[in-house]
Amino acid sequence: MIEFEDLNKSVGATHILRNIKLMVAPGEKIAVIGPSGSGKSTLLHCINGFESFDSGKLTVMGHLLHDRRCNLQALRAEVGMVFQGFFLFPHLTVLRNIMLGPVQVRGWAPADVEAHARQLLDKVGLPDKANHYPSQLSGGQAQRVAIARALAMRPQGLLFDEPTSALDPEMTKGVLDTMMQLGRDGLTMAMVTHEMAFAREFADRIIFIDRGEIIEDSPPAQFFERPKTERARDFLIHSGRPRTKLLG
């Protein structure tokens, strides 16, 4: 579904991504972790065309992002993005926020979109918030609305860029519970996060990146219990999460 081939990106003299090689299969869930400034979010943003790159190839569901003729609008309709900020339109109700993309971009019938939007609000645990405005929501509720809005486009995959970083622990739980449910539904998902315990439970694979390079690509149990590299081991020790004994 997603394939990076020797992808590189620099900003000035700084090499942001170095020779990235990565494949994500349909239905797979990956968690991208690493220290701040390591290139995690840049890697994620390349998948949706929000960041350009200098060399290499990137194919997402048949869309060739290394080809300047790539239709980014079509790509983004198929691969949704949930950011750290919620970016809900403050003058629209929750229901209208969710409906806007499918009606305006997909051109779907408003009545059908509304029915689906209400189903999605039920799915994210907010069936009673349809007629509320964003200012009337908590941060956790607003982020779950943002997830519902991304799902309203009926994407084949979802990208999450630290979706809980601006939330307190109580609000975080509702968002993470929603993401776990989406994973059980078989949606292809890639997430950048500092939530180590959640990454271990959520992901099929952990992608550890440091200084723009993928250092480890492992199943969660292997990465958290038997990291292959000293750099990953140091990161886990200093992160303090999850509370697991590092072996070997």
Image (cartoon, helix red, strand yellow):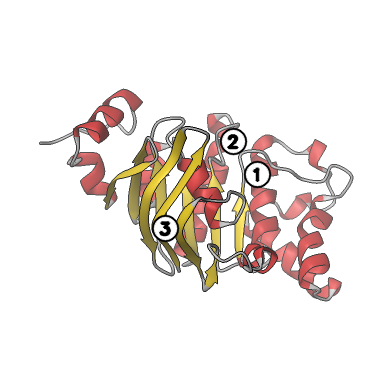
Q: Is residue 171 visible?
A: yes
> How far from the left and from the top, in percent, is residue 248?
10, 36
Q: Which residue is mark 3?
A: 29
Task: Describe residue 105's horizontal placement relative to residue 78 as left or right.
Answer: right
Query: Dot 3, crowdedness within 10 Å: few (<14), some or many (≥20)?
Result: many
Task: Of the two numbered discs 3 and 1 on the same chain, state the one appearing first in sequence.
Answer: 3
Is label 3 in contact with label 2 (beta carbons under 8 Å)? no
- Mark 3 or mark 1, which is nearer to you? 3
User: Which of the 4 image quadrants contains residue 200?
Assistant: top left
Farthest right residue? 91
Q: Amino acid at mark 1?
A: Gln
Q: Which residue is mark 2?
A: 171
- Mark 1 or mark 2, which is nearer to you? 1
Q: Is residue 201 above or below residue 153?
A: above
Q: CA distance from mark 3 to mark 2?
A: 22 Å
Give the secondary structure at mark 2. Answer: helix
Farthest top residue? 238
